[in-house]
Amino acid sequence: MTTDAVGGVWTFATTLASALAARGADVHLVTMGPAPREDQRAMISASTVHLIETPLALEWQDPDGSDVPAARDFFGRLERQLRADIVHLNSFREAAFDWNCPVVIGAHSCVNSWAIACKDTAWLSQPRWRPYTKWLAAGLNHAQAWVCPSRALHDVMVDLYHPRSPGFVIWNGTPQTESAQAEKEILILAAGRMWDSAKNLSLLKRAAGKLKWPILVAGPADDAHDCGSAIRLLGQLRHAELHRLMHRAAIFASPALYEPFGLSVLEAASAGCALVLSDIASFRELWDEAALFIDPTDDDALRRALIELCSDASKRTALQQAALARSRNYSVRRMVDSYVAFYQGLLAPTPKAILTPALEVSL
């Protein structure tokens, strides 16, 4: 299984790899891109998952494909050495390499769908980005199958790339806590990179002026993003630290323009936060009737929603309970059961085995 350590893919991959290993699978987790931090390595069941760190570039950091020959050589040698039964790629272009076993793609996001959602597509016409799209489409076509964490992203991928291989939807999962903290603090929490237009945290910055509750944002920041006194930027937190903060916060806000799933939202819901989310297809699919939805282009709408929840304890409590209840639909066990069935389908004698509707969790 490949992964990167840049964002939510690391949380997904380490959770799935560790759970598969606990069920007896021999899992080799291969990193690409920046090396994981020590706290990220601690998220792996070290005794059962074999971590292999490489200097290979991530496809979106290498759009012209300069690193492809090195990656092709490395993975060819690794597959022969491990005699893998299945290759699970949490990226696209490597699926177009020559493999001797079934290959599945975990399609978590892509640059093209990100740019379209953020209405920032002009730079994609630059010559250096054309190979990226060609490699991505080739990977989808060469894989035996591909999996998305939401129906919303699945439909976007079909519209953009028209892949020949079948696509499936398996929702992500997070460990379920025994119980959420009963007494929540007067605190609004958000998470993400301030400069990432997809996270749209600038909307929260503009909406924060008239709010009496403190707003904390966890995630990488730089000196170019001065949020004044309205928002406190926490910087990059360890995963365990962010979880503790979620258990304290009464409200979690995500005004994202683009979020194929939103693991941080799921983790916040599992910690008993009331959710204020942008009204986008993926969030509606996952959290309809369990969150307060706002127009992600309207800072007044976000401000009104947060003021309403801050001042109405009964509504806030109802949304906290609704989010917690919905989060139980997205358990690690359900995710792993679905992936095990999916892998078994890939290894079955006939390709039809992987077309079982039960593999599509959203059904």
Image (cartoon, rainbow, N blue to C red):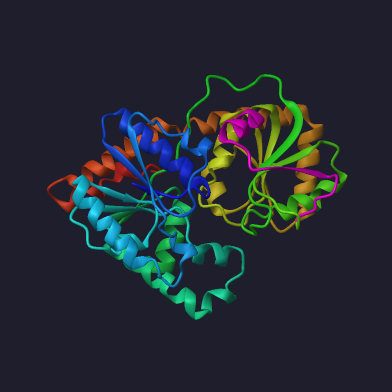
Residue 243 forms part of the magenta stretch:
yes
Of residues 111 and 224, the one drawn nearer to the viewer in this rendering: 224
Instruction: Tell me where the magenta segment starts and ends, as one range.
Output: 225-246
Give the quarter of the figure containing the C terminus: top left
* Label total for image: 0
Does residue 80 appear to the left or right of 125 in the view shown?
A: left
Of residues 74 and 275, the one drawn nearer to the viewer in this rendering: 74
Residue at the location (59% across, 76% down)? 122
Does residue 104 appear to the left or right of 155 in the view shown?
A: left
Q: In which quarter of the image is residue 52?
A: top left
Residue at the location (52% across, 43% down)? 286
Q: Which residue lies furthest to the left in this view?
A: 349
Does residue 76 appear to the left or right of 197 in the view shown?
A: left
**Residue 147 percent location from the top left of the image:** 36, 51
Could one spot residue 311 in this view of the protein? yes
Of residues 285 and 43, the one drawn nearer to the viewer in this rendering: 43
Of residues 291 and 130, the one drawn nearer to the viewer in this rendering: 130
Q: Measured along the vertical axis of the image, is residue 65 above or below residue 22?
A: below
Residue at the location (46% across, 66% down)? 62
**Residue 26 percent location from the top left of the image:** 26, 36
Does residue 161 appear to the left or right of 99 in the view shown?
A: right
**Residue 206 percent location from the top left of the image:** 80, 53
Residue 260 forms part of the magenta stretch:
no
**Residue 258 percent location from the top left of the image:** 58, 56
Q: Quadrant of residue 22?
A: top left
Residue at the location (56% across, 67% down)? 116
Q: Measured along the vertical axis of the image, is residue 160 above or below residue 331?
A: below
Could one spot residue 85 in this view of the protein? no
